[in-house]
Image (tube, rainbow, N blue to C red):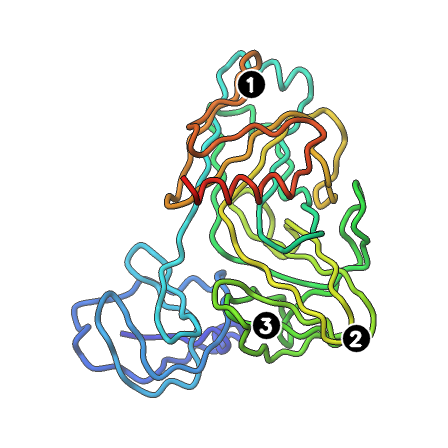
Amino acid sequence: MEFVRIAEAHSGVRSACPTPPKIHQHYQPPPVDLTHEAQLFSMKSLRVLGFLTHYSLPSFDWVAGEDELYVLSSNKEVIQMTTYTVNLELDADTRKFLEDGEYSLYVFKGIDAGKGAASAVWLKLGGSTVYGQGIVGISWEETYYVGETLTQIQSDAVISGVNPYMNTKNTVPVTLGNSYLYQGTTWNQNPIVAPTESAFWIENQPSQVNSFYVSQKSSLGGTGADDFIVVQRILGNGGTASFTPIEVVAMLWTTQPVKKGAIITRAFSAGAVITMVGTTSADIAYDKDKGWIGPSSQTSIIRSGSPLYESMLGSHQMAKRI
């Protein structure tokens, strides 16, 4: 079995780690997909497919299983990255009506960033992606990026002037249980342990309030680094904020020319909030006459003018109580 360190792989040098005991001699992992990036961790043990292998490993990030990707977490275990999917069904008459009217589908992704945060347009979908098929599938994993932005929290402002968290060369995803230190013009590349393991944190060290964004990769978006989902302001001189993942998305139709990455404080049309608590998928539909249709345990309607970020948080909290 060969394990490859991503730090070396990205530089074009393929270097295998020490060979573990032969308890895995019948298991051969598939070729490593270097498009996936993850944080590097100091590890002394690695759990793969239920077996525990002990050996010294200075740094390691992930290992490919037969069908899934396993990522090393800071608690020295390998966790399987869960994929979440929302399937939106559109009948032929509805697709034609929406396409003729030049409607676009706007998708927002929930995250608990604390009071005062605002959501941004995560995805703007149209054309063959929406109208060329009966079902639109949107999938994502818990892959988040963060950065500082000059954009102030106000409706319709498009996130720009970004200063992303990155290693020496590349923008890299953050990890739950870590706190990331913004120093003013640069980020400290060595995150510290966060107060909670279920969230990632940002500490704003300059002596002024700054705005920070979170972005998240999806199957229909870009690289993930510029697929913004939320903006939050953080107090200066060591102020902190936590960001807890929640599996909630909101969908709205409109003909308005709203840009991807625009901050939206209130829904600009009637939409649906889809919540996944204890499940990894949701099947919903939209009908031009009946509106949004979906399981009552997962789907709630958001009215035009309703606070968008707060509505997604409220739906998640309600779903946890069911």
Real-space Cα separation, disc 1 to disc 2, in angstroms? 47 Å
Residue 169 vs residue 53, the one in the foreground: 53
Q: Is residue 294 left or right of residue 65?
A: right
| SS class, disc 3 | strand
Residue drawn at x 71%, y 46% as measured from the top left: 261
| SS class, disc 1 | strand
Number of residues whose C-alpha sits closer than 10 Å to that of mark 3, classed few (under 14), some (14–19) or many (20 or more) = many
Number of residues whose C-alpha sits closer than 10 Å to that of mark 1, classed few (under 14), some (14–19) or many (20 or more) = few
Number of residues whose C-alpha sits closer than 10 Å to that of mark 2, classed few (under 14), some (14–19) or many (20 or more) = some
The image quadrant of residue 61 is bottom left
Q: Earlier in the sequence, mark 3 or mark 1?
A: 3
Q: Is residue 307 left or right of residue 26?
A: right
On the image, numbered disc 1 is attached to which residue? Answer: 291
- Residue 236 lies, in percent from the top left, at 78, 71
Q: Amino acid type of disc 1? A: Gly
Residue drawn at x 78%, y 64% as measured from the top left: 210
On the image, numbered disc 2 is attached to which residue? Answer: 206
